[in-house]
Amino acid sequence: MSNSLNLRLDDLNISRLNLIVALDQIASQRQWAVTFEDGDRIVKISCQALPELGVPHGIDNDVSAALIDHFNSLGQPETGVLELSATQLLKLCSFHSGGTYYAMLRQSLERLHSASYTVSGGWRDHPNSRWTHAKFHFIESLDYSAREAGTFDERTIVRIRLADAIVSSLRSGYTKPLDFAFMYSLSRPRTRILFRVLDAVRVNPEKLDEVVNSFEVNVMAWADQCKIPNGIPGNIRRALEGPHQELLKRGYLREVTYLGRGKSQRIRYDFHPAFTPLDPALIRRLRQHGVVDGVARQLANDYPKTLLLELIDRFERLVSTGVLVVKKTPAHALVHLIRNPDQYPLAVTAASDHSIRVRRAKPAELLADPRTQLETEFLGKTPEQRSDAVLARLTLLYPRKFSVTELDVLRQKVARGDLDPAELLSQGAQAMANLDAQGFVLQVKELLNRENER
């Protein structure tokens, strides 16, 4: 069963349009194009790929989702640049760390980097409430360190810049909750792709608070949505049969029904109510007052998100001003107010935020921890965890100041214990405070270059 603790954010443009072919493997497909009607709009989407790599498919869904998740976890940096180890990215994808998986990851990143996407009339400009065009590579730039040309291993550091269109979409709040743990627990790539697409089409693309518990679509249109490259209804049904059975067995789908015959037949999906996507920000607000997840899910099913946020704001203002005195528990008092708002006085509330906002860390905050706090933070971490944590914090504070080869060496020195992570980060923080960032960068580069020459 889904656990709201595992809910993070996915980009709604990417997941709704689905840029990944929902097949585990493809032969040599170099392009695809789909055209469909969406209300009064004609939407066209196309993909062009290199012959030797083919169009993104299968596990490329896992990798693209992991990159979006990591981008969110960093506070959605405006540059769209991600710098992390290949090992860390494998873990984010729930892949094993081994030679085969390193090779798979490299090929996936190359496909996402080389494939060119064009979206006409279907890319949502959320802040301006309009539909626009977009042309991009999912990964606009890709750089990595390697001991052997064109290979990944446990030392590889990857530097990725996401497409500006994706960065803007995420930073504008055009996002939806996604249960990453559940998605990655599904057995096959095509099932994970279908889950991600289904979870996205449940959300009203223009009113993100509205979520449906059933969805019906023409079988041919659904094949286009899933990028299944054949036009025969029987083949489409066979391609979807395995994913359908797993999603039914796992409780995400309550029922799948085919209506009609031939190319005019339709698929109806009925979703299990327990898998209604919950807004992480809303759940966090409710948890702060002790509301358990089961009650939170029920409230989310019964009331619009914007109304719940307004009522939570009212509750907090009434309590903070002493107008409302909690007699039992905060959770009981808050739920009672939500269920019976007319019994409570109105309070001036701030305008509700209609999107999920990820707090963006300010540079001065990233490494501003005292030395003792930094030391405590690294206690109990494995050498690999320490090195990945240092890499993440240092590259956020000093973006693109070090080459991937230098970051490779730095990560290894931290993992071996040659560099004290707390000392390194506190020196970086002090250099920022003293307006001597360039001096710190040069000092670290000199240290790393000496190591590289040995």
Image (spheres, rainbow, N blue to C red):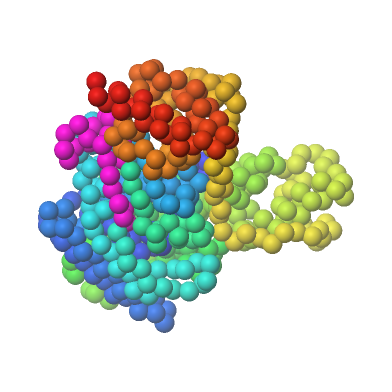
Q: From the viewer's perspective, is 53 left or right of 338?
A: left
Whether residue 154 is in magenta: the answer is yes
Residue at 27% x, 40% y: name it: 144
Residue at 36% x, 68% y: name it: 134
Residue 20 image point, x, y percent = 28, 57
Q: Which is nearer the eye, 86 or 2?
A: 86
Residue 382 image point, x, y percent = 41, 21
Q: From the viewer's perspective, is 408 left or right of 235?
A: right
Q: Which residues are magenta?
A: 138-158
Residue at 16% x, 38% y: name it: 149
Residue 3 image point, x, y percent = 50, 42
Residue lying at the far right of the rendered structure = 323
Whether residue 372 is in magenta: the answer is no
User: Does 352 appear above or below 183?
Assistant: below
Q: From the viewer's perspective, is 240 left or right of 305?
A: left
Q: Main secondary structure of the magenta part?
A: loop
Quarter of the image where the C terminus is located:
top left
- Is residue 207 visible in this depiction of the protein? yes
Q: Which is nearer the eye, 346 or 185?
A: 346
Residue at 80% x, 39% y: name it: 328
Residue 143 figure quarter: top left
Q: Which is nearer the eye, 140 or 259?
A: 140
